[in-house]
Amino acid sequence: MLGFYAERLNAVELNGTFYRTPPPGALTKWAAETPPGFRFCFKAARGLTYSAAAFPKVAVAGQVGQRLAEMGERLGPVLLQWPPTARNPDTGLLDALLEALALPVAVEFRNQAWFAAEVYTVLARRGAALVVTDEEKWPMAPVEPTAGFAYYRLRRVYTDAELDRWHERLQAPEGDVYVFFKHEPEAPARARNLLTTGTDRRHPV
């Protein structure tokens, strides 16, 4: 299935790593089964941002970063997601996690309190992207150029006209552009359409 997928699309966002890290050897095996231009975007472990204060978040982030680095050049940005219940931006923790991961990271905030200048400063210093998520339940982040790549999560049901507007919006020259649709039957066709009408720098799934 992975080989079939990688022949048609050029990136995948994996949610399973939110719950557990793949076993040793799995990442190198997946990398070997995909072409050079393919990228894996792993969702970082939920314990890094969803756990209680006593959880060793920074130490675990270092372990997660080391394991995911086994993917080598096939590794795309790691998705670090903050829960909607996180209402008070903790820029110290954000900075520490980005440093410990030591990988390209895209950060998704589900509470608009994080859409603030001090947060963008940390992201820019670490070269991490602010994720723009189009989802009814969460506020959409502004487009802030904090990294050399962009990361979009398009999670609604779209009309053709709405998809056309996204096509136009994603034409901006902002480095590599990662675009992921919600996992539903229409998603592969939408991704193929976006890929074939976009540029070689776009990674839609």
Image (spheres, rainbow, N blue to C red):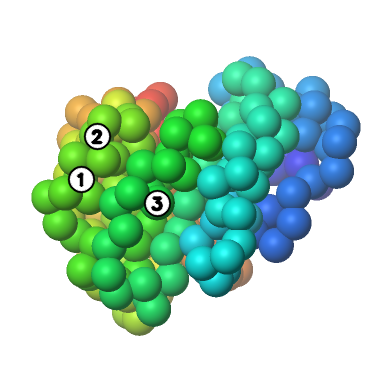
Q: Earlier in the sequence, mark 3 or mark 2?
A: 3
| Cα distance in 3D space between marks 1 and 2 | 6 Å
Give the amino acid type for the residue marked by disc 2 in the picture: Ala
* Residue picked out by circle 1: 120
Name the secondary structure under disc 2: helix
Q: Residue at x 61, y 44 (%)?
A: 59
Name the secondary structure under disc 1: helix
Give the amino acid type for the residue marked by disc 3 in the picture: Leu
Give percent across and percent down for residue 174.
24, 30
- Asked if one can make out residue 137 in the rendered structure from this viewpoint, the answer is yes
The label on residue 93 is: 3
Give percent across and percent down for residue 86.
36, 72
Examine the rendered structure and indicate whether residue 72 appears above or below residue 47.
above
Q: Crowding near pointer 3: few (<14 within 10 Å), some, many (20+)?
A: some
| Cα distance in 3D space between marks 3 and 2 | 15 Å
Give percent across and percent down for residue 93.
40, 51
**Contact, mark 1 vs mark 2 (Cβ under 8 Å):** yes
* Residue picked out by circle 2: 124
Which quadrant holds residue 194?
Answer: top left
Give the amino acid type for the residue marked by disc 1 in the picture: Tyr
Mark toward the viewer: 3 or 2: 3
